[in-house]
Image (cartoon, helix red, strand yellow):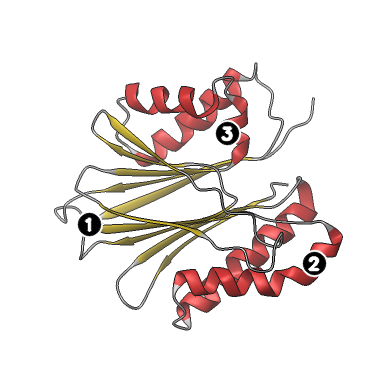
């Protein structure tokens, strides 16, 4: 059982919300923690809360559980396909990547995970997006599998020529497992969203790949 949870939600204002949460540890307990974060985020954004306000409120609601020392990350991407913008919000999450041709930008922040500190502020960054861009989210199980961590991952994303988002997500997970000699020490999840001009059925196609922990 994986402790990671994911959501892809179309909002009433036309935005597309992608959210990934990694519960502390693995198994049923970790899954419960990450599911709470994702479900609350969905409910609050659908109710009209701003994403930053929603994350702050989730952190406040989550604090009573802190006595059990169980936390969860929150990794949120909001794509506005009409304005051509992308918002990144993070609470303790692994780096997100924006790939544009051969250029790869790393988006990372130092914000604490949900449930650690009452007044924790989410990391926020906003950038423009263009046709052909890829947004790649992942949990730390992927990053930790690479000896060179983010530096090695950046090179991997620069060098690959895979354009299908599903195949790219699968490739990243498979490469992470290969880098660690076939072992899966932690839950591994990858979300890839590809942005295209509206000449296809969808302007943004997200793909999610999860590999749960296997202890050996």
Q: Residues within 10 Å of mark 1 (few under 14, many from 20)?
A: few
Mark 2 or 3: in front is: 2
Name which residue lies at 70% across and 62% down: 117
Q: Position of residue 115 (x, y in %)?
A: 71, 62
In the rendered image, the residue lying farthest to the front is 119
Instruction: Work out whether 176 lies above or below 105.
Output: above
In contact (CB < 8 Å): disc 1 and disc 2? no
Q: Position of residue 50 (x, y in %)?
A: 44, 75
What residue is disc 3 on? Answer: 142
Of the residues tagged 1 and 2, which is closer to the observer?
2
Rendering coords of residue 164 (x, y %):
32, 37
Q: Which numbered dot is residue 201? A: 1
Q: Is residue 18 left or right of residue 142?
A: left
Which secondary structure, mark 3? Answer: helix
Spatial separation of the CA atoms under disc 1 and disc 2: 43 Å
Indicate left or right for 191 with 199 as reference: right
Q: Which residue is mark 2?
A: 65
């Amino acid at each position: 059982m994986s402790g990671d949870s994911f959501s892809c939600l179309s909002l009433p204002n036309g935005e597309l919300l992608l959210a990934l949460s990694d519960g502390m540890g693995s198994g049923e307990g970790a899954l419960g923690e990450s599911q709470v974060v994702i479900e609350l985020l969905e409910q609050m954004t659908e109710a009209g809360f701003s994403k930053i306000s929603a994350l702050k409120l989730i952190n406040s609601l989550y604090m009573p559980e802190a006595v059990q020392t169980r936390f969860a990350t929150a990794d949120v991407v909001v794509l506005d396909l009409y304005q051509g913008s992308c918002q990144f919000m993070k609470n303790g999450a692994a780096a997100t990547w924006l790939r544009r041709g051969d250029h790869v930008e790393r988006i990372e922040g130092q914000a604490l995970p949900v449930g650690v500190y009452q007044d924790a502020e989410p990391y926020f960054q906003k950038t423009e997006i263009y046709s052909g861009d890829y947004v790649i989210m992942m949990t730390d199980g992927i990053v930790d599998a690479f000896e060179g961590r983010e530096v090695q991952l950046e090179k991997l994303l620069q060098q690959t020529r895979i354009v299908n988002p599903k195949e790219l997500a699968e490739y990243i997970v498979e490469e992470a497992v290969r880098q660690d000699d076939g072992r899966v020490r932690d839950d591994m999840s990858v979300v890839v969203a590809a942005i295209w001009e509206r000449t296809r059925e969808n302007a943004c196609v997200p793909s999610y790949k999860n590999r749960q922990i296997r202890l050996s």
